[in-house]
Image (cartoon, grey):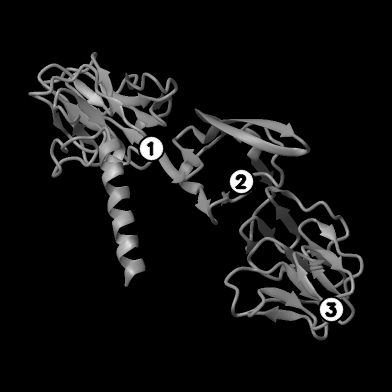
């Protein structure tokens, strides 16, 4: 009991110290925003997202008139003179006609605005070029339109407006062209690891059409017409420069059958295997018997060989090869086996017994009762 009383006293002291150190006074209007506060003398307005000044910080709304200030929502406020984004004054905005909609559109009678956050110390509204505030509406996170234009990431795109369609997240058509996202991807390598920085530049025309209504959607990556298969998606590598390099086109005399083997792999006319938009690189593959063993992009098999992604698993026995999964795991394990070996991501796992190899739900390791394994390696 004594220890409990001491603990409660310490908590009370900590709470009092926290309250004393806080720069925040009374909240301005808790029904509209949990982020705008008076200071303790009620002489200034302070912005602190959700009042979390200790972790996130706080900033003074410098130009705010304390007597007339009122929040609009958790990110916007106004007084008799200005509109504010967080603590930043937006002097170019017409205050009287300013509107912030529930789906994220910010506008006045002259402009629709996006937020330029490139300067952390001066985040400001920037007019969206050609956007009509009277007819502007959002389609989704990336797209918007008004009565005359479509906008991609707040930039107007040159398309045939009456016939333009968004057919996939990364593919679009009008009566003239097939378009893909024009993304610039900068690859940086440090200590042998490559990372990619992505910037959206708009959309780019990659093919022309006679009739856009011929296009059929196979999945989120593949489209086809009567003679052409299109792939729109990430390449089987992170070494690409832009979205155009993630677009491929394969033409056939006629496409009579399409079998979707997994998300990135299709079989055309029972003769052609297309993997990540390109012809499967192993020429000896038997297309008629070629199939995916799962839907997670990894293992394939035909009557002669077993494959992992686009490589032959030379040691694998076709007749006894199977995947190893467990009901306790909701995702593909990456493990497979045949009568002789165990494999992880297509690589032979040394010293693993295929007869006893299984998942141990208690230890969270794969095991053959002699060794435990993590990502194909013995746990030491």
Above or below for 44 versus 177: above
Q: Are marks 1 and 3 in contact (CB under 8 Å)?
A: no
The numbered dot on residue 342 is: none
Identify the element where label 2 is drawn: strand
The numbered dot on residue 338 is: 3
Residue at 71% across / 71% down in the picture?
293
Residue 8 percent location from the top left of the image? 30, 60
Q: Which residue is mark 2?
A: 230
Outermost residue to the top? 92
Identify the element where label 1 is drawn: loop
How many callouts does the rendering have?
3
Residue at 44% across / 22% down in the picture?
118
Q: Nearer the viewer, mark 1 or mark 3?
A: 1
The numbered dot on residue 56 is: 1
Q: Give the mark nearest the N terminus, 3 or 2.
A: 2
Residue at 77% across / 63% down in the picture?
345
Horizontal side of residue 183 vs 87, given as left or right: right
Above or below for 137 versus 107: below
Residue 109 percent location from the top left of the image? 17, 21
């Amino acid at each position: 009991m004594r220890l409990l009383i001491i603990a409660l006293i310490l908590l009370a002291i900590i709470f009092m110290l926290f309250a004393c150190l806080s720069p925040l006074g009374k909240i301005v209007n808790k029904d509209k925003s949990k982020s705008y506060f008076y200071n303790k003398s009620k002489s200034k307005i302070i912005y602190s997202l959700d009042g979390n000044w200790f972790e996130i910080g706080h900033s003074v709304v410098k130009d705010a008139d304390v007597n007339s200030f009122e929040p609009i929502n958790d990110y916007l406020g106004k007084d008799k003179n200005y509109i504010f984004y967080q603590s930043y004054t937006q002097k170019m905005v017409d205050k009287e006609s300013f509107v912030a909609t529930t789906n994220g559109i910010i506008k006045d009678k002259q402009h629709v605005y996006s937020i330029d956050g490139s300067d952390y110390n001066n985040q400001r509204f920037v007019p969206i070029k050609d956007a009509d505030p009277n007819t502007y509406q959002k389609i989704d996170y990336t797209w918007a339109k008004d009565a005359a234009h479509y906008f991609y990431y707040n930039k107007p795109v040159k398309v045939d407006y009456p016939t333009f369609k968004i057919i996939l997240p990364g593919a679009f058509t009008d009566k003239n062209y097939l378009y893909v996202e024009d993304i610039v991807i900068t690859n940086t390598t440090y200590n042998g690891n490559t990372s990619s920085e992505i910037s959206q530049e708009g959309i780019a025309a990659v093919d022309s059409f006679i009739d856009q209504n011929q296009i059929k959607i196979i999945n989120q990556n593949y489209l086809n017409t009567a003679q052409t298969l299109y792939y729109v998606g990430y390449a089987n590598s992170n070494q690409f420069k832009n979205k155009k390099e993630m677009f491929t086109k394969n033409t056939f005399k006629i496409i009579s059958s399409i079998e979707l083997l997994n998300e990135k792999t299709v079989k055309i006319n029972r003769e052609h295997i297309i993997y990540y938009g390109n012809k499967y690189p192993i020429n000896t593959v038997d297309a008629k018997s070629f199939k995916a063993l799962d839907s997670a992009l990894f293992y394939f098999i035909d009557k002669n060989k077993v494959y992992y992604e686009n490589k032959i698993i030379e040691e694998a026995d076709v007749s006894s090869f199977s995947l190893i999964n467990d009901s306790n795991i909701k995702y593909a394990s990456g493990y497979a086996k045949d009568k002789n070996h165990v494999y992880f991501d297509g690589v032979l796992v040394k010293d693993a017994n295929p007869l006893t190899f299984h998942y141990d739900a208690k230890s969270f390791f794969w095991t053959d009762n002699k060794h435990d394994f993590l990502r194909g390696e013995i746990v030491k």
